[in-house]
Amino acid sequence: MKRILICLLCAVLAAGAAAQGHLEFQGVPVGGSVEACMKALRKQKFKPDGPSKMRGKYRGDDVTLTLGTSPASGEVCLLLLTYGQAGNWQALRNQYDTAKMMLGSEYGRPSLCKESFDYPYSEKDGLRAVEHGKCHFTTVWTTDAGEITLDIARSGQLQIFFSDKAGMGGKD
């Protein structure tokens, strides 16, 4: 019985320690220097494409990965994944729905989900509504380590932001 209680206590403490750490992207902590983060991402088959950019695959899709740094510390605090142009509204919407389902299976229920069009635009206006800033598709998952935001950008591209709470100076 004591052994079980000790194991449970260790598991709870380990989970608490992990929660206070950095947000991770494919096992790579969103933190540290740009060089160290890029080195770890190269091991995940991402290839450098500039001082703070990389290219690679995320769950089978070609993406550009941009590393954002904190002005205060200079350390990585944000990873931005940008998908290529979808070509049409249906393809973009399918890309969004698929990413939302996959992220939901990993991070659970989102803390925010907004999927709407500004009047007079609607689903049938598709990319035209996106380009005019009248389409709002954003889903956010909040974790102890930071936030993951899925968004359809005005450029007509799907974006996923991994924002690390520790790197942004966030404290509990």
Image (cartoon, helix red, strand yellow):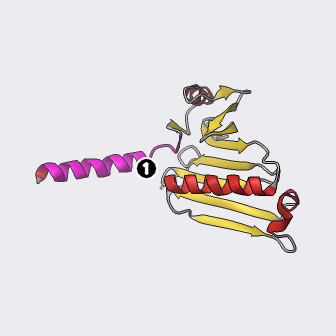
- Residue highlighted by disc 1: 19
Residue 56 image offset from top left, x and y in percent: 66, 32
Residue at x 55% of width, y 37% of height: 31
Amino acid type assigned to the residue bearing label 1 in the image: Ala
Overall secondary structure of the magenta stretch? helix
Residue at x 76% of width, y 42% of height: 84
Residue 118 image offset from top left, x and y in percent: 82, 71
Residue 9 shown in magenta: yes
Q: Is residue 114 left or right of residue 148?
A: right
Residue at x 61% of width, y 26% of height: 35
Pick whichever, 115 or 34, lies toward us.
115
**Quarter of the rendering containing residue 131:** bottom right
Pick whichever, 81 or 125, lies toward us.
125
Residue at x 59% of width, y 28% of height: 45
Residue extending farthest to the bottom is 119
Classify mark 1: residues with Cα within 10 Å, few (<14), some (14-19) or many (20+).
some
Pick whichever, 29 or 20, lies toward us.
29
| Quadrant of the rendering where the N terminus is positioned | bottom left
Q: Is residue 160 left or right of residue 156?
A: left
Q: Which residues are magenta?
A: 3-25
**Quarter of the rendering containing residue 121:** bottom right
Please determine whether, in this image, residue 63 is positioned above or below residue 42. Answer: below
Residue 164 image offset from top left, x and y in percent: 56, 46
